[in-house]
Amino acid sequence: MRLENQVAIVTGAGRGIGHAIAVRLASEGARVASVSRTEANARRTADEINAMRADAATAYAVDVSDHPSVQLIGGRILEEFGRIDILVNNAGVTRDGLSMRMSVDDWDTVLNTNLKGAFNFVQAVQRAMIRQRSGRIINISSTVGLIGNAGQTNYAASKAGLIGFTKSLAREVASRGITVNAVAPGLIETDMTAVLSEEIRKNILSKIPLGAFGQPEDIAGAVAFLTCPEAKYITGQVLAVDGGMVM
Ligand code: NAP
């Protein structure tokens, strides 16, 4: 098992892409902290992993945008697992709408969850990684953060912000043996994209050279690669996993 004795935190592990990442890292031997906003969802993923391998996962319910609570949970995870090797900042939300009509609340919710949430978890774990002189941090951005999208100024800003955050943090911690990368999914079939109309889906599909939407497992595979020894010389990068939509 490649990730035996390693501990991974996955935020937004309750559903969709985060669930696939948590299960994939666990299947390679990692012990997993399954973090989600809704306790039942975090627990469902942890239970699924524990059914695969006893005591391999624990569930934690926290709102990633809440800095003090995230510091507490980070401390508990460190206490309970003893170390932290991998942090996947995956929790994210959309609140779409044209900028002209966007409420301040919709702007704040998206930025606070998608961007500040990642900062919060990095602050909670980076001291432990620095002490270990090793770690892998992976931030789930989006192709929308690379090219923008009408109706998603808040979401695109948060995802582009994550790319700047990734590159700056990568420079800060490289000398401590920690790599920081971003994965930018295209359209992946989850609850988040299930709400899109047939017309929008058709339009997006026509722009995907590989001719299909992605599955959560496609993102989990890219994240797993970035945790491999083979990826030890990769940092500050954005890996698009989008069927060729953005190239
Ligand atoms: P999803 O199915 O809607 O799942 C989102 C997950 O994030 C859920 O587990 C949710 O928790 C968690 N979450 C949301 N807000 C949170 C908060 N404040 N605190 C803690 N957890 C929170 O979304 P997804 O499609 O899997 O997306 C996962 C990530 O990939 C997101 O960052 C998204 O922006 C990014 N992404 C997705 C796509 C796509 O096409 N699906 C494309 C590009 C990027 P609960 O389950 O507890 O509610």
Image (cartoon, rainbow, N blue to C red):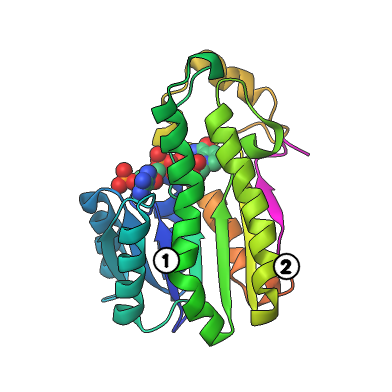
Quick check: 188 left or right of 239?
Answer: left
- Earlier-in-chain disc, 2 versus 1: 1
In the image, residue 238 lies in the stretch drawn in magenta: yes
Q: Position of residue 237 (x, y in %)?
A: 72, 57
Q: Quadrant of residue 26?
A: bottom left
Q: Residue at x 44, y 84 (%)?
A: 5
Disc sitting over residue 234 in the figure: 2
- Gap in Å between the C-alphas at discs 2 and 1? 20 Å
Secondary structure beneath disc 1? strand
Q: Quadrant of residue 171?
A: bottom right
Mark 2 burial class by Cα count in 10 Å: few <14, some 14-19, many 20+: few
Report the predominant secondary structure element of the magenta stretch. loop
Q: Position of residue 215 (x, y in %)?
A: 51, 43
Residue 188 seen: no
Q: Position of residue 133 (x, y in %)?
A: 59, 85
- Check the image and name the residue furthest to the right: 247
In the picture of the structure, the residue carrying the numbered disc 1 is: 9
